[in-house]
Amino acid sequence: MRDGRSQRIAEWLLLYGVSVLGALVLSAMLVQATGGEWRPVLSALLDGSLRNPGRWGETLGHAAPLLLVALGTIVSSQAGLINIGQEGQLLVGAATATYFGLLIGGPGPLNVAIILLFGFVGGAFWASLAAGLRFSRGVPEVLSTLLLVTVASQAVAYALGRQWLLLAPEADRGNRNQVSQQLTEGNRLARIELFGNEFPLTVLFAVALAALVAFAMGRTIWGFRLSMMGKNPRAAKRFGVAERTYGTGVLLVGGGFAGLAGAAMLAGGGFAFGNYQLVPGFSANIGWTGLLVALVSREKAVAAIPVAFVFASLRTGSSFVGSTGVEGRITDVIQGLLVLALLLPPAVMFLRDRRRARAAATARV
Amino acid sequence: MAGFLEALWDIAGSESTYINAALFAAFLAFAASGEWVAERSGTLNISVEGMLLGGAFTSAVGYDITNSSSLALLAGALGGMVVAAIQAEMSHRLAADQFVVGLTLNILVFGLVGFLDNEINPETSFADRWEIPVLSDIPLLGSALFGQRWPFYVLYALIPFCWWLVFRTKWGLELRASGENPQSADVSGIDVNKRRRQSVYFAGFTSGLGGWFLIFGQIGLFEDSVVGGRGFIAIAAVIFGGWTLRGTIAGCAVFAATLSARLSVQGLGYDVNSELLQSLPFVVTILGMAVFAHRVRPPAALAQPFVRGLR
């Protein structure tokens, strides 16, 4: 029995190793085929994400919102609901947070809490549109969440152009015409400094939330009901799991976490995310990438932590790739190939297990 | 209010509205007809966006090499089918989650095409315009339906072909059986996952054609933002149409009308909030689904993976 187990682990490792290696080799071949060199690209990626001074702190700062988005997605996909509109939910969350954060003011730490809270509320509100359509009108949430992304970015652009909503008063916006007021010094998230790297407090917050989500999904009755809904909706119904309540709930949580990520980017961001103010293109694909993080971690909140870090490294590394003469968008390709590669092993193992089980069943007869 | 009605009247009376609407509708219909076939087999294929973009790019590259828009057609179809191959083999041979695969593919194709476009930068142009005599002289609709560039007319063959394929062939019957009741289909000897794979390949084929049409029949040049989320509107058109071909085409027409009204409003010089206009097609799509999604019956096994012996 013990033997079988270690053999299984070896099989898993082998499968993952081979497919990740395959993805990387494919990316390297692509770089070579278009006239580049893969070695300098790899070294630029590592420089930009880890090795150069201050870079791993920057990477952590990118990983935190990715992780937050991924956690929300993990909760909703455990219940079998597919929310793919994180990008829009994040943006609406950030906009709501900006609006109320500037409106309420208040003493520093309290106001940071208010900003984060309203980020959550904003994201949850945007997801609630999709949830309402899903459970009262039968509109698939896959499509509605996605179509709402464009609507969200247009709505936020609208608000950013109106002074009574988000646009900063003329004195504060310089020569830009679509930017909100900056959060004042006291209203920002604290930044932690470690070995010459600094990153916002969001990082610790996100890791703590990951632990919380892992606990809630694995050890509580709610988590159990959600996975029942996801794995066997018919059984869930028979056992009295209220599909509408739980489904709406998880979609709200999913949207809320995305909105929270937006608010955290706003209050803890630095230059990478608009420098403490809302600007056009604020979301910077964090929503989409966070979704990929969730998909790759296969509904395991703890696994999302390293995955978020790897994907954040690709983001922070990509800005260094340009200097090698290879287009920085190669990192998008690497990322996509990596995701596909990480999908393969579980699928292959599933089929192998079934084949083995069937062979065993026939042998018994 | 009177001003609004007047504007609406103006838009409805201008020929360019119909020409644009026909172009948008054709682009959506290329993708949606294949997607309809795929969904009838029980797979909710969300990589249409990637297939369209892939097809558009490969057709542009094909034209760059061969200088022929008909050979570019083949290249476009091939590009769509390459994306389809990954979608089909991973989700209906290896049983990976179809949404996850589709979503990843969309992102991967977008990254890949953006990367390669910078490296290759294909040269493209329009295909020839064919004015069909007599028919193209019909007022308002004539030049919209019969005065377009020739890629447009491929659609007139494609749509009846889809109908014939699904309702008049044995393959189509097996396909629909796979979408309605895969267990029974399996018992009666149909290879459910094979039919689904084939239907995804078909969706890749038509979407690839759609990408080709977009480049050579509508805009004449390639950028990585040409598709711009409309692949998802094509999926919405299938739902809007209640999984019937007629309804799907009607859905394409409705969504295209909104896309085109957006252009006409600006072209005719009306001052309407641009953010509202930009999001209008998406809002109309969502509202369309909200009204119709409830009244129609999807294929019973839609989006449910089939593994023999499970369930």
Image: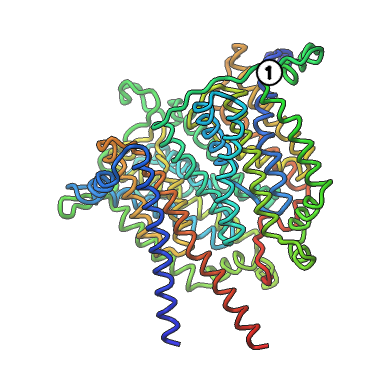
Determine whether, in the image, residue B68 is placed left or right of residue A160: right
Could you say which is closer to the camera, residue A354 or residue B10? A354
| In the image, residue B163 above or below residue A299 | above
- Image quadrant containing the N terminus of chain B: top right
Residue pictured at 49% horizontal, 42% vertical: B109
Residue B115 point in image, percent of width and height: 41, 37
In which quarter of the view is residue A95 placed? Answer: top left
In which quarter of the view is residue B277 placed? Answer: top right
- How many marks do you count on the picture? 1
Could you say which is closer to the camera, residue A182 or residue B247? B247
Residue B223 point in image, percent of width and height: 48, 28
| Residue lying at the far right of the rendered structure | B168
Amino acid of disc 1: Thr
Residue on which disc 1 sits: B17
Q: Is residue B97 visible?
A: yes
SS category of the residue bearing label 1: helix
| Residue lying at the far left of the rendered structure | A195
Could you say which is closer to the camera, residue A332 or residue A93? A332
Q: Is residue A118 visible?
A: no
- Image quadrant containing the C terminus of chain B: bottom right
Within 10 Å of disc 1 (Cα), the crowding (few <14, some 14-19, many 20+) is many
Determine whether, in the image, residue B281 is placed left or right of residue A88: right
